[in-house]
Image (cartoon, rainbow, N blue to C red):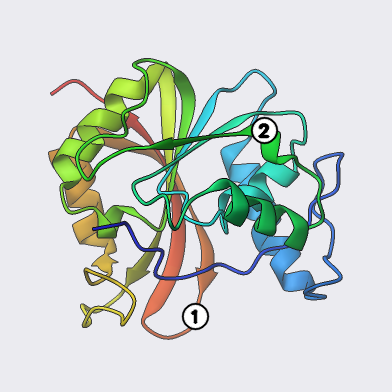
Amino acid sequence: MRRYHCLILLFVAVAANGQPAVSTKTGDSSLVSTQKTILNFINISMQDTIADIGTGAGYNLVPIANAYPTLHFTAEDIDSNYCNRKKLLRQIRATGNNTSIENFDIRYGTETSTNLPPAAYSKVLAFDVLHEMSAKSLMLADIRRILQPGGSVYIEEILVHKKAKKERACNYPYLTEQEFKEILEDNHYLVKKEQLVFDSGHNKYIKIFECVPVLP
């Protein structure tokens, strides 16, 4: 069972100097603001080693990679039909061709493990995927394993104010913020900082969190 991306975030092209630029394919300056918020929050440096968990077709990772056209990223997923070179290349072309397909090391994990090397990454990204993990505790433990000492996990999640039924494309319903933070606490992660990314004005909103592992 693959990890599904229940919400495909709209994306913008990012200029080679790392500053967001309005894509001619979207023409929506509000998307620029959203992308800039994410980039500023993650605060990537050229010394970072980065893995993206549950990359899928690259809707979330490729716009980030566009801001850093010489940086390499590990793209991890469990479904080779959904995450592959062809689909990542399609996203690169759709968002301005600022990065290269050669900048992505595509790796395949399982429902319980990323199968990535230990202590290899200074930053791990997990966008719109935590609520879809069937084995959350095992995956969070594995993410701890692949983090370098002092590294951080950046988790972006669609959250709900009131519990709702699962979305049509999802295996599991979205979490409330309290449920989300309880999962992190139960698995020995501390939220270092957080920021609102998007608010629908209704039941759903999106936040991004920087999380660090703590001793049990």
Tag 1–tag 2 contact (CB < 8 Å): no
Based on the displayed image, in which of its 4 quarters is residue 49 positioned? top right
Residue drawn at x 72%, y 53% is 92
Q: Residue under label 1, please give it.
A: 200
Indicate the position of residue 182 as horizontal and vertical percent values. Answer: 17, 50
Instruction: Please give the label number shown on residue 103.
Output: 2
* Above/below status of 16 relative to 196: above
Seen from the viewer's position, the closer of residues 29 and 111 is 111
Type of the residue with mark 1: Ser
Q: Secondary structure at mark 1?
A: loop
Q: Residues within 10 Å of mark 2 (few under 14, many from 20)?
A: some
Vertical placement of residue 35 versus 172, above or below: above
Q: Nearer the viewer, mark 1 or mark 2?
A: 2
Task: For mark 2, give the secondary structure.
Answer: helix
Query: Residue, x 35% and y 30% (percent of image)?
Result: 212
**In the visual, does 156 lie left or right of 48?**
left
Residue type pointed to by label 2 = Asn
Question: Is residue 30 at all visible to an observer of this figure?
Answer: yes
Q: Mark 1 or mark 2, which has the lower sequence index?
A: 2
Q: Residue at x 53, y 69 (%)?
A: 198
In the rendered image, the quadrant that contains the C terminus is top left
